[in-house]
Amino acid sequence: MATKTYPYQNLSLKSMPGERWRPIYGLEEYFMVSNFGRVKRLEYVAIYDNGAVYPKPEKIIKPEIRQHHNHYKDDYSGYLAVRVGLEKSIYNFTIARLVYWVFKEDFDYYDYTKVIFYRDGDSFNIRPSNLYEATISQKQKRIKDLRRSPNPFHKLNSEEVKLRHWNMLKHHLKPIVQYSLDGKKIKTYNSIVEAHRATGANATGISRTAKGYHHSCGGFIWKYGEKKKYKKKGDL
């Protein structure tokens, strides 16, 4: 029996029949993703701190197959991810989520209350038509239906499930604070992507400004906020 092949295994720069490319939000000048789930680095010139100049050629980024261990079943399920570097920053993407974000819905990529599923159950089939968005409650129901977990949430109603997951997720979200150039606080956003969508400022530029690499981005100063200021999702 022949082994099934997938587009992500193709590392050729030549586009496949029907393949379309779009820039990755916030990294538009450096990386693109296709509707087949392939990630491409664009050609650019990198300048290092020591003054060295290195031309970076165009290339297809080889994805990683990351394994998730199910302790209840004691088995593994794989999914595709990619890690790209730009100057001193590293960006990690789950490719299915990245494809959905770029080709189907411009949502907050880092809002993990939104879950991306595969219609045919194949986590390597990451074309937009095979991806759909689900809630955490739907994810928990699916896990229970597939008997993949004893599921401690099955006795909770949907609002209790949302609240419990928000209490877990809020510790991983990183708020970003917008200031005017003269230092006056303007607004706090839940994430860099939310700030990018609201102001039009480049997401990578916001991140690098908050880390101290730049003074400003998009006409504003940006700083990371305090996680402890988060409230329940229903109070935002």
Image: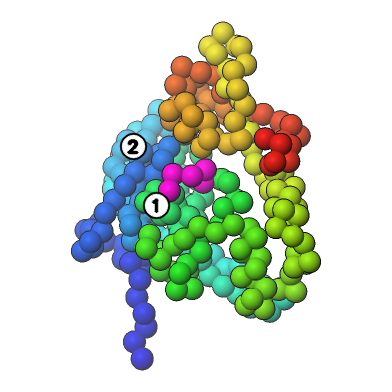
- Residue 83: percent from left, percent from top: 48, 52
Label 1 crowd (10 A; few <14 / some 14-19 / many >=20):
some
- Residue 87: percent from left, percent from top: 45, 37
- Residue 106: percent from left, percent from top: 44, 44
Q: Can I make out residue 65 in this image?
A: no
The answer for how far apart the CA atoms under marks 2 and 1 are is 21 Å
Q: Quadrant of residue 52?
A: top left
Label 2 or label 1, whichever comes before in sequence order:
2
Q: Which residue does the numbered mark 2 point to in the structure image?
A: 29
- Residue 105: percent from left, percent from top: 43, 48
> Start and end of the magenta stretch?
105-109
Q: Amino acid at mark 1?
A: Lys
Badge 2 element: loop
Q: Quadrant of residue 62?
A: bottom left
Front residue of 113/126: it is: 113
Question: What residue is rendered at 52% in x and 31% in y?
Answer: 195
Label 2 crowd (10 A; few <14 / some 14-19 / many >=20):
few
Q: Viewer-nearest of labels 2 and 1?
A: 1
Q: Is residue 145 above or below residue 87?
A: below
What colour scheme governs how the chains and residues are painted in the rendered image of this protein? Answer: rainbow
Q: Is residue 32 left or right of residue 181?
A: left
Badge 1 element: loop
Question: What residue is rendered at 40% in x and 66% in y?
Answer: 130
Q: Which residue does the numbered mark 1 point to in the structure image?
A: 104
